[in-house]
Image (cartoon, rainbow, N blue to C red):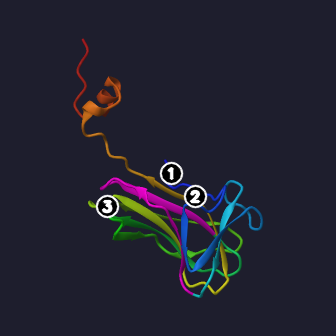
Amino acid sequence: SDLITNGGFEVDTSGWTTSNCVLARITSGPTIYAGTAVGRMTASSAADMYIESSAMNVVAGGEYTAMFAVLTAVTKRDTRIDIRWLDSAGALISTTSGMAGNDFVDEWRTFTTIGTAPATAETAVVRGYVVVPANTEQHYVDAIYFSRTNPQIISDLATAPSPYARLVMSSAPLPLIE
């Protein structure tokens, strides 16, 4: 399930911080990608701009997927999504960067990255980037998503929720019923 709170900006822009841009919730203008609102990033300088989610708990060794949809108001720019892995003190351990590509004027594009949480990771944040926009340039973001993609099998079968679940999750051969 999605770990990001407010990835569609349906109510406001809470849960997001910014760098080199102003983030606003809008309900009109470009075609809405999903729901009834999108986030509009307006560059406050001619430098990389990004929005960053609040920190979310992760399981070390777990595989996670991050995604966002992007549309530009005028000029195509390189965009990408990153997963930034953090330790218990909130310090950066490493970053899993998605492949960069241009956003489009007339069509939403989605960008995705998949990464494995390092052994010392306790939380992660997701960053959606637009690379070197012109000052005041606008780009729209929506449907920002972060989820575990490869849940680990419960290793202690005694903690499984029911006898049936313990049986299904066991790797031992099933007994023959005579």
Instruction: Identify the residue at horizontal 66%, vertical 55% (top origin).
Output: 10
Q: Report the disc number at residue 2.
A: 1
Task: State the image coordinates of residue 141 (x, y, percent, origin top left).
Answer: 62, 66
Magenta highlight on residue 178:
no
Q: Which residue is mark 2?
A: 7
What's the residue type where badge 3 is placed? Ser
Circle 3: element type = loop
Residue at the top extreme, as displayed:
178
Q: Nearer the viewer, mark 2 or mark 3?
A: 3
Disc 1 to disc 2, C-alpha distance: 9 Å
Among the two numbered marks 1 and 2 on one chain, the one whose residue lies closer to the N terminus:
1
Of the pair 110 and 129, the residue shown nearer to us:
129
User: What residue do we see at 31% from left, 24% from top?
Assistant: 163
Crowd class of label 2 (few under 14; some 14 to 19; many from 20; radius 10 Å): many
Instruction: Please state which of residues 81 and 28 is positioned toward the viewer in this rendering.
Output: 28
Q: Is residue 160 above or below residue 87?
A: above
**Label at residue 88:** 3
Q: Amino acid at mark 2?
A: Gly
Which quadrant of the rendered structure holds the C terminus? top left
Query: Is residue 103 toward the left or the right of residue 161 in the image?
Result: right
Of the numbered discs 3 and 1, the one sitting upstream in the chain is 1
Instruction: Please tell me in which quadrant of the rendered image residue 125 appears.
Output: bottom left
Check whether the beta carbons of the residues at disc 1 and disc 2 lie within 8 A of each other.
yes
CA gap between label 3 and label 1 equals 22 Å
Name the amino acid, label 1: Asp
Left or right: residue 119 versus residue 69 is left
Q: Give the total number of marks visible in the rendering.
A: 3
Residue 170 visible in the shown view? no
On the image, the x and y values in percent for residue 77 come to 60, 80
Q: Please report the bounds of the magenta region as a residue range.
A: 47-70
Principal secondary structure, stretch drawn in magenta: strand
Question: How many C-alpha atoms fall within 10 Å of the one at disc 1: few (<14), some, or many (≥20)?
Answer: few
